[in-house]
Amino acid sequence: METTTDKEFVEFIVKSIVDHPDDVQIERSVDEMGVLISLKINQADMGQVIGRQGSTAKSIRTLLRVIGAKNNARVNFKIIEPEGSTRPRKSEDTNVEDVVNDLKL
């Protein structure tokens, strides 16, 4: 039987800190790169899960690495951005000149 301690850990932590625990969806997939824990949450809870400057998400990732090391697995954590998010998307084709010109404005 496959153990999913990592998935249960993320589910417990995230449901404890969000305002909409019923909207929490966690998927666990395993491939040659290791284990990937994907998290889908309510758009209103994004700030709580990410934390100030990403501190909460970074802490969850760190603890998942500890769990993974204990089980001889590499565990990665991905927060899937909900539909209708208001956060501006990063542009893949932005270059240094565009950024400098934006700063001059």
Image (cartoon, rainbow, N blue to C red):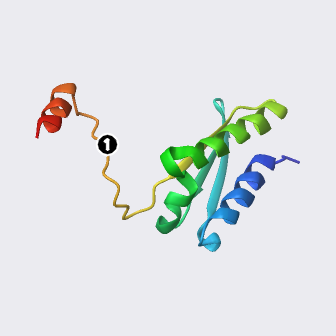
Q: Residue at x 23, y 33 (%)?
A: 93
Q: Who's the residue at 15% across and 27% down the image? A: 97
What amino acid is found at the position of numbered circle 1 in the picture? Lys
Residue 74, quarter of the rendered image: top right
* Other-residue count near label 1 (Cα within 10 Å), few / some / many at <14 / 14–19 / ≥20: few
Residue at image point 17% right, 36% down = 103
Q: Quadrant of the C terminus?
A: top left
Vertical placement of 57 versus 100: above or below?
Answer: below
Q: Is residue 1 left or right of residue 94?
A: right
Q: In which image quadrant can residue 25 be found? A: bottom right
At mark 1, the secondary structure is loop
Q: Give the side of residue 65 with respect to residue 105, left or right.
A: right
Q: Residue furthest top?
A: 96
Name the spot of residue 14 as percent of width and height, x first.
Answer: 66, 59
Q: Residue at x 17, y 30 (%)?
A: 100
Q: Position of residue 63 (x, y in %)?
A: 72, 41
Residue with the mark numbered 1:
90
* Vertical comparison of 86 with 90: above or below: below
